[in-house]
Image: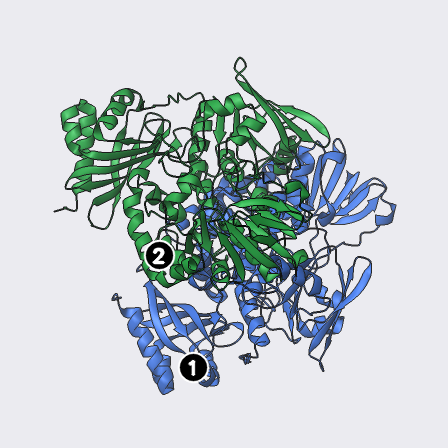
Chain colours: A blue, B green
Amino acid sequence: MHSDRQPARWLADFHAAMVSRDKVQFQALFLDDSYWRDFLAFTWDIATLEGHDSIWDMLLHRLDEVKPENWRIESEDKPGDTAGAWFSFETAVGRGKGHLRLKDGRCWTFFTTLRELKGHEEKRGETRVAGAQHGVVKGRRVWQDGRNDARAELGISKQPYCLIVGGGQGGLALAARLKQLDVPTLIVDALPRPGDGWRRRYRSLCLHDPVWYDHMPYLPFPDHWPIYTPKDKMGDWLEAYASILELDIWNSTPCTHAEWDDTTKRWSVEVERDGRTITLRPAQLVLATGMSGVPNRPAINGQESFRGAQLHSSDYKDGAPYAGKNCVIIGANNSAHDIAADLWENGASVAMIQRSPTLVVKSSTLERYGRPLYSQAAVEAGIDADKADLIAASIPYRILPQFAKPVVARFRQDDAEFYGKLEAAGFMLTFGEDETGIGLMYPRRGSGYYIDVGASDLIINGDIALKSGVEIDHLSEDGVTMADGTTLPADLIVYATGYGPMNDWAALLISSAVADKVGPCWGLGSGTAKDSGPWEGELRNMWKPTNQEALWFQGGNLQQARHFSIYTALQIKARMEGIATPVYRAD
Amino acid sequence: MHSDRQPARWLADFHAAMVSRDKVQFQALFLDDSYWRDFLAFTWDIATLEGHDSIWDMLLHRLDEVKPENWRIESEDKPGDTAGAWFSFETAVGRGKGHLRLKDGRCWTFFTTLRELKGHEEKRGETRVAGAQHGVVKGRRVWQDGRNDARAELGISKQPYCLIVGGGQGGLALAARLKQLDVPTLIVDALPRPGDGWRRRYRSLCLHDPVWYDHMPYLPFPDHWPIYTPKDKMGDWLEAYASILELDIWNSTPCTHAEWDDTTKRWSVEVERDGRTITLRPAQLVLATGMSGVPNRPAINGQESFRGAQLHSSDYKDGAPYAGKNCVIIGANNSAHDIAADLWENGASVAMIQRSPTLVVKSSTLERYGRPLYSQAAVEAGIDADKADLIAASIPYRILPQFAKPVVARFRQDDAEFYGKLEAAGFMLTFGEDETGIGLMYPRRGSGYYIDVGASDLIINGDIALKSGVEIDHLSEDGVTMADGTTLPADLIVYATGYGPMNDWAALLISSAVADKVGPCWGLGSGTAKDSGPWEGELRNMWKPTNQEALWFQGGNLQQARHFSIYTALQIKARMEGIATPVYRAD
């Protein structure tokens, strides 16, 4: 049914329908049940329009300003159930890339991204800077002078246009992109060195995602980089990255308060540096403090009487001091499992208290099936990280479950014996309320799962004692007493109880009024556990305009840091350059 | 005349002639005037065999052991005066790549390189390490433990197999390759931080070669990297590189003496670290102390009576202190020009004393014509740095002049007006004794030229006073008196008088007996100025076995550091693994 040229013909018809503003013609091109996912190009938002009425409404509002043109097919997908193609296009202010999927000649999914602003293109390849200033120049300023000036001036005599709070991968990736766009940017981070956010975590931590998923912008990992980066190596990489990309960072500089001045359109941000309070006045403020908020430390009766150590998982470092000791982990997600295994490896007696079902997926299974776009095979097929990011983003969240469910079914089938043993050990399993697995649990709630790298076997064979389906009643001097009357002896209790929502940071640093105005961060509004509705169809408040002017949230894993920093950077650059950025909101 | 399949047919015939050891058949395949350049694959040397008799002799000696097979054309060159192709092949111990050029069906140039040792392949791509050790392991060692151990043990309780003296680009590139080959390697460097070799040079220095020429192994520069890297940025890059590649370096550690023990087959190398003398016992010693030897400081009558400052160019940092002062530069090559311009830019009165003709080429002209293999256009044509290195190396030095002369002629024509003005200003020009330009002057003597980035205009318009063709008679209290009786007033004299030969380092660190046994480093034996014969056809003693067992010289620019480190590393790895490495020498 699909001719080779079908997407090209469709694209031409689509352009014609837009030019003529012909609703009938236009709607004939889209399925009733169609989706337009847009990253900035049309909406100056990260948004998915669902259904051809919503799409038409958006276009009516935006066409005059966006002036899309030069639609051109770049490559066609291999033929399948749908006819897909990548295309490029231009708007009045920028250039974009996109993807479309046709079913029987009508559009099912449409995806548009703004990739650069006209007149503000990144200087690379042929347009890179000279570096040397040839010729002779009295009073020549050399590169090092510029770096020294930036260090001496930025935040002191010269205000950054953009201030990023937090120098993890999210902050660094965004700062790297802003640097290439000539946006004066300063990062402040409470820790002493770039990469310390990783270094200070527990000793055995490695990235749970494979290397192909984890590249930072501009500087891909070398080809021999390990599949799962150890946390200290990741710390060193980020530190080298900050140097190579010439990022301006104030380390050992906690941020204590921020306030928006609607008259001057500037933030006042207080930071503590070298024992002094410095007030910064950026035009844009980015919270890149991690997608997790403040550690959840549950209140349990008798906590004060417990004589052993109590740690939140974020403060756990190393199991060595607990050899021969009794340790109880409260929680059963990634950190809980990693810490339990680390303690066991160090000779502790370990019990884990599981309070609710956990999604478990074996790392080796994920590696085999889970991320075909991010694999050596993909690299060898010419799919680099940027291309993979675009392919992944071309599927709107609403229809992602139908792609995710068969994968979950395959996981369950392959690992049926493993799951059976886990359940036999009393472990409460879930594969997501609608059996959509980790692929949807991550955007919905960013927690609730364990990527198994070995701890599940310890639970199966009883090396880690599991207590599940029973509430904790109280702590005593030397243990945890459960509602069923049993007691788990404890020298150490680790609260692997997760974190509050990301907009905790807005409440802490700015005000609860602003945090409330912004509303929850992360989550799709799926109406599943820890992701209450209404449906948003995109991660709430992430990388896009919030209800607080000039406040941005940057967070998530390395893939998200890499991909979405493009769009946060373009939004901030457009505002700096005075380019109109009217945000289209469907409702 | 050339069919598409000609190289493939030739390669099959070539293999057949080798199998049958048929000299007549074999020699019919090669022109009388033919060249076989081999990097290790056949000779365990870096050598060019000239003429089909020499080639046949080498094969007779080496075929039984090398057992070449699986010759396969990988790609054919665009048709031209010659029919060229890239091929792969195997030997008994390794895998190689090569290139051939046919003229009328017979071979003119043949190029073979060993690229990896069987059973000792680098682990990358699909074979990269896991990083994380999945499963549970009592007493788990994590990545940071391994790095800490290496730092604590290497050179102390565990001897490096290879010791590299000098942590500039040559030492770092080699160490990076040895790391990927699991050769325990330590670098010692006198300076405090990796990259300081660049940082401590004069303020205005930028690389004279463009970015495409300068990539280090494994970690190419990002796509926005400036064309001409400023020296401090280069220093920071190398420091980040050392961290990312996990190189083991002792900085602030001068090497004072080395001695070979022919009984134990180990070196004794004394280094000064933290105020203590430590003796290292590596099996292989690499001098990566720079292709330049000890600074030449000419003796001139009256030097002691001069009351101003006298600096060798290597100690010159910054012109700022010399505003309004009289400065005399002795010498007229790259550093002389750069320093003269820097002083002039800082408001000094500058005179340059040219003692012999200089090759001058405008940087912009070089950029336009000089390095087509190392350019954005090459990158966009799919020629990465490694491919460019192989293409460049496929032309033996003997015939390089015939490729170089037309380029020089074009430079002279394009810049005729510029050269005319320079000569009118009294500047003594050369384009190489045989008009082969910088492309041959560099391998012959590594000096004698200026890549013009602006100082020539200062000479042309008289801003830099030039004194050429006159000897220096003596220094007085306050100036330089020339043989013609004129005096140049001077508050500062800069000796931009170059460096001694690289094997100075062997004399200084080991003994003059060993330095003499090794003989001169660098140079082709071309019989031109500063490159006396006999003809060698390869850079003497560079990256290849020397007359001193287990002593290696690593030096040169970034391109050489990148490319030739492959071969030095494979030679050292083969020796560590006990693979036979009989060095074939034609004479």
Q: Is residue A252 left or right of residue A540?
A: right
Which residue is more in the foreground, A67 or A274? A274
x and y percent of residue B452 in the render? Answer: 46, 56
- Looking at the image, residue A312 lies above or below residue A342: below
Distance, label 2 to label 1, CA atoms, is: 42 Å
Quadrant assignment, res B193:
top right
x and y percent of residue A191 in the render? Answer: 72, 53
Quadrant assignment, res B508:
top right
Which residue is more in the foreground, A30 or B510? B510
Q: Amino acid at mark 1?
A: Lys
Give residue B369's mark: 2
Give residue B13's mark: none
Marks 2/1 in contact by CB < 8 Å: the verdict is no
Describe the element under mark 1 as helix, strand or loop: loop
Q: Residue at x 51, y 45 (%)?
A: B471
Quadrant assignment, res B44:
top left
Q: Nearer the viewer, mark 2 or mark 1?
A: 2
* Residue B195 appears in the picture as rendered: no
Q: Residue at x 68, y 43 (%)?
A: B305
Q: Residue at x 68, y 35 (%)?
A: A344
- Looking at the image, residue A465 lies above or below residue B411: above
Residue lying farthest right? A305
Give residue A67's mark: 1
Q: Are marks 2 and 1 on the same chain?
A: no
- Looking at the image, residue B399 lies above or below residue B138: below
